[in-house]
Amino acid sequence: MKRKVLLVSSANPYPVVTSGCERLVNDYESGVFSAFDVYFLAAQPETWAPLVLFREGAPVMDSNFDELPSHDFAFVFFVGFKSNDFTRRLAAALPSFCLTDHYPNDDLPDGVFQGILSHRLDAPREDVLLCGGSYNSRIFYPDRQTEDIVLCVGRIHQDKNQLELVTRYADRIYRRHGLPLYLAGGVDDREYYSRVRAHIDGKAIQSTVDPARPDSADGWCTSQQIARLCNRARFFVTASPRESFGIALTEALACGTTCVLNGCFTGFNPAELEAHVYGNIRGKRGEILDLLHQAFNLDIRRDGSEWVKKYSLESATSQQMGFIQERLRKR
């Protein structure tokens, strides 16, 4: 019989994945913790109060949150963390681990976790594992197709900066190079989407969002749909000025898509990443359309599909479960 694990996060992938963090939660359920019977507790985004307990994607209707600390979970794994009475009690009652985008992190109290996993680490610590995010290599792999689009994947939100891409894309890129920009992702900010929507003409700039139903879940793509788009894209491009770890970026790299970036990607070793992408990864310089235009003119091709395998679910499972099991033995 499989031992039980409790996964806790405010990033809830049910009923549909709408962010990289939610995809990460999905991948932990189905990949990293596949040897366990995984329960997922969705927390309220602001307060981290418990909302819904899931098992195999279905709500556990008779769940009693107050009783969770007394259950026989092998360990609790927090993706992110916000301290409140419930989370402190849960973390103290059971062997607990936390994944964070950087460490030290003011959100994480000392002496609570058996171990911490972090995308960025200021100084080595025995109880902290430096690790990246992960992607599903069973879905994302090179299967190159027509290369008839430029692809941007992400929720439509000012943090992702799509407006910089779309404002002059038709004149700067489509008119000169002939490939449309395809925005794959749903709406996460209605006001910002209305500004982006003004440039979506269905020809030079296309989108998965139905403008008549911007709040529909249909705008969000499955992993399989994104993989097909990545393999179809001449370039993957993002104007996001900062990413702790870009899961969409790793997925595009895994498909062998040339990636054009202009921001700060703190979840990677920059000396490694910059050899496999085009543009700026240590901070924004200039405009993303200038870099994309250069990539077209120079016929830039960068295939990072072999290098990025270090972030595959298989690699993450081996590394992270090794760390967790070792820390549990020391308990």
Image: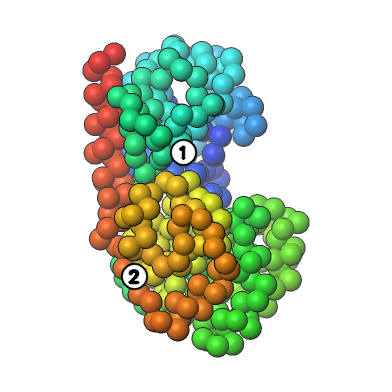
Identify the residue at image location x=64%, y=55%. Answer: 157
Q: Mark 2: which secondary structure? A: loop
Residue 125 visible (yes or no): yes
Q: Give neighbour class at mark 2: few <14, some 14-19, many 20+ (Cα, 10 Å).
A: some
- Relative to residue 322, is residue 30 drawn left or right? right
The numbered mark at residue 101 is: 1
Which residue was labeled with disc 2?
302
Residue nearest the observer in this picture, 70 or 120: 120
Disc 1 marks a residue whose amino acid type is Asp
Residue 269, image x, y percentages? 35, 49
Disc 2 marks a residue whose amino acid type is Arg
Q: CA distance from mark 2 to mark 1?
A: 26 Å
Residue 73 location, quadrant = top left
- Relative to residue 101, is residue 137 drawn left or right? left
Which quarter of the rendered picture does the C terminus lie within?
Answer: top left
Identify the residue at image location x=24%, y=31%. Answer: 322
Q: Mark 1: which secondary structure? A: loop
- Relative to residue 231, is residue 290 drawn left or right? right
Identify the residue at image location x=38%, y=49%. Answer: 268
